Structures are given as structure tokens and as C-alpha cells.
Amino acid sequence: MKWKTAICAGAGFVRKGAFNMANAADCLLHVEDMKIYYPVAGKRLGTTDYVKAVDGVSFEVRRGEVFGIVGESGCGKSTLGRGICKLEKPTGGKVVLDGEDISGYNDNQMRPVRKKVQMVFQDPYASLNPRMSIFDIIAEPLIIHKLAKDKKEMEEKVLDLLRKVGLDDYHANRYPHEFSGGQRQRIGIARALAVQPSLIIADEPVSALDVSIQAQVLNLMNQLKKDFNLTYIFVAHDLSVVEHISDRVGVMYLGNFVEVGNKESLYRKPLHPYTQALLSAVPVPDPTAKKERMILEGNIPSPLNPPKGCKFHTRCPKAMGCCKAEAPKRYQVSDDHYVYCHLYDDVNNQ
Ligand code: SF4
């Protein structure tokens, strides 16, 4: 398919901004126009400005898939993950989990929902209570959600979870400081698995680990996905890690997705200039391979005062006049690949 690159007509599009819920039974998570803004004191006395960490994001996650979210630090990917399970309160938007609209839920209403969605956090050193034994850490969600009828069943479940993540029974009586980073992340995964969730949101789960340990944890996550029929949202800044584990990938920039597609299509033929720049920076394990790097000039603009039009226009080597004036719409370029960029304004005319 040949794209024209100079037309800035801003023409309509088949599914602009909307969601394709063609097969609702397959859809585990539906997020629509999610916004997470943080108020800060304005420049003038008495006014309020907003840091727009997540600024109108829409996407869906299918049952049994790994949806990777990738982008530079500060793009809002972790905030988006935390917003889905209400660890951050969304300013607006809709979240439907397993057919249940949880958008307006308060903490009490969220409690049973947390059985369906669990998080694995980035820092395995900070995410485990140092005063609790590993047994107590893993048993805590079982107690909260009343998932064991007596002490014996509780013990069986905790030990079973430890074995599932590659640890031994004797580890149950130890404390977090006695473990390595990789082992602590395994404990974090066991704690998330305790309530048998449908969806696990893993926020940079391997970025604090050594490379060799990263591979072990990723393989473990892959195995557990098959064993427990899990669905993951996998948030990371490392494109190689995301490629390894994901089925579909969303690329975020300044609080919005700029491109979403299945892994093969997005990595083989990235469409958005930002995705192209990110992928051009990924090292190739072949010293003879020649790769043309696309260097982005300048810094990411502040989410307090993002640029008008396309938020990427201040750094985009392909920016055109219309990019400063008008935010690009969503353009579906194939069944499972869409992009937000004026370069594809005429895609619906193909
Ligand atoms: Fe596309 Fe934005 Fe670059 Fe314009 S500035 S070409 S819309 S990425």
C-alpha cells in the first residue's frame, strides 16, 4: 500500500477515535478516552494548571494476549496501567473489565474487582513489605478475598504458588531482604497470582533486574500465562523486551498512543515517525549489520504545556504545516494496526 505524504486534508476516517468492539466476547479490557490529570498551581495566583499524564487514551485488550505498552520515561505508560486498576484516580474516561463498567467505582466497589486485575510492580525491593514473611505476603490477598477455608488450605495454596514461580517451600519463612531482585520479583508475581486474576498489569517488571535474570522472569511470565490462561498488560521502555513477550504493542508519547499494532506488523513496518525513531535505536546483535539511526532532536515537551496539534511535531523530522495546527486522527492501516499521524491522512481513500 502506497501512502501519500503531502496531503493534510484531515479527512474523516473509518473508525476515527472510536473503538472496534467487533468481538466483545474476546475483549477482556476496554479503555475509552481515559484521562489522568494532576492539578498544579497555575502561573497566576488562584489558577490551576494540569499535568496531563494520560490524555484521552483508548484501546482494548483481548483475552489471553500480552499487550505491550512502550515509550520513553514520562510518557504516561505507568500512570495508564495504574489508572486501569484505580491505583491512580482517572480524571475521565471509561474502563470496562470483563464486561463490567468499573469507571465510577469507589474503593469499596473496587475490592471484588481487584480479584480480576492485579499489578506486578517495577521495583521488587520496594513492593514487598520488609516486615512480613514471604508466607504472610502471599497469604495476605488470600485472607482479604477469603480464598482459603482454613489454615491448612491457606498453607497449601501459598506453598503451591511458591513452587509455581520457581521457589522452594523453605522460602516461605524468610523475609524479603534475604532474596535477590529476581527472586523478589517472583514473589511479587506469586502474590499477584494468589487471587487467580484474569488480567495482570506488569509495570516495568524486569527493568530493575540484571539482563540474565530478566530472561528468567520473562520466561516464567510466559509459562504462567499458558498455565493460568492469563492476560497481561506489559509496560516497559525496552523495545526488545516488549517484542519478546507481547502479541500487540502500543507506543505512547506524551500521554497518548501514537501507534498500536500487532507485534509483527509494528516491528517490521513501523509507521509513525516516533516509532521509527525508537526502533532505529534498538541495537542489532550483528556487528556487520548497517542500520540507519533516526536521531530525535530536542527534549520531550512538558506535559504541563504540551504542543498544540500533533504533540510530536516539535521533534518530528517529517513535520508538515498542518501538524502544528491540528491533532492527527486515528488511521486504521490494516486489521490490527493503526496510527495517529497526518502522513496517513489519505488512508481512507486507498
Ligand atoms: Fe505525523 Fe506528527 Fe510528524 Fe506530523 S508531526 S508527520 S502528524 S508524527
Image: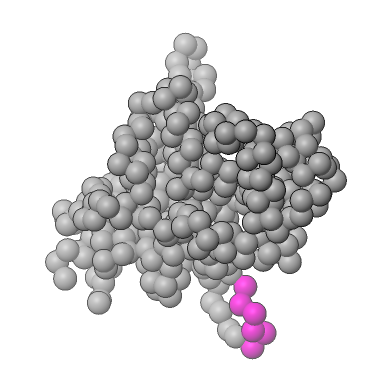
Residue 41 against residue 136 in the figure, above or below? above
What residue sits 38% from the left and 55% below the top? 63
Q: Is residue 287 magenta?
A: yes
Quarter of the image holding residue 26? bottom left
- Residue 53 shown left or right of residue 187 in the figure: left
Choose between 348 and 33: the one closer to the eye.
Answer: 33
Is residue 95 in sight in this rendering? yes
- Quarter holding the N terminus is bottom left
- Residue 350 shown left or right of residue 69 in the figure: left
Residue 118 screen position, x and y as percent? 53, 42
- Quarter holding the C terminus is bottom left
Q: What's drawn in magenta, residue-wise?
A: 283-288
Q: Is residue 212 magenta?
A: no
- Residue 321 shown left or right of residue 49 in the figure: left
- List the single residue furthest toward the right: 178
- List the single residue furthest toward the top: 46
Is residue 318 in sight in this rendering? no
Residue 153 screen position, x and y as percent? 63, 40
